[in-house]
Image (spheres, rainbow, N blue to C red):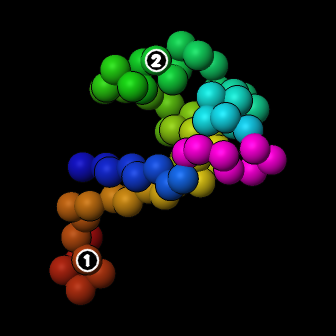
Amino acid sequence: MVNAHAGPVNGGRAGLSTPNRIFLQGVGVRFVVEMEAGKPTLRLEHILRVLQALEGCLAVEGLPSASEGA
């Protein structure tokens, strides 16, 4: 399970709106619409670009810890 939490979305760097910050990262409108709709298969590269634009972070849960072994 992957949880993504976006940080501040209003204002941000240089006073750009959220859509403008995302699109400056090279991510298209279609990708954003599909991501918001919960499409089960998306390119991780684009997800990371959106998170960067939103000053967000990515947390991966459910992986075994180092002490449990792989």
The residue tagged 1 is 65
> Which residue is found at the position 54% from the left and 53% from the top?
8
Question: Could you say where residue 7 lies in the image, as x and y percent from the top left?
Answer: 50, 55
Q: Residue 37 carries which label?
A: none
Range of magenta residues = 9-15
Of residues 15 and 62, which is closer to you in this image?
A: 15
Task: Report whether residue 52 is seen.
Answer: yes
In this picture, is 9 found above or below 19?
below
Q: In this view, does 30 lie to the left or right of 23?
A: left
Residue closest to the far right: 14
Q: Earlier in the sequence, mark 2 or mark 1?
A: 2
Residue matched to label 2: 33
- Of residues 12 and 26, the one nearer the viewer is 12
Please state which amino acid type lies under the numbered disc 1.
Ser
Q: Position of residue 70 (x, y in %)?
A: 26, 70
Q: Counting other residues with Cα less than 10 Å from the Cα at mark 1, is it few (<14), some (14-19), or many (20 or more)?
A: few
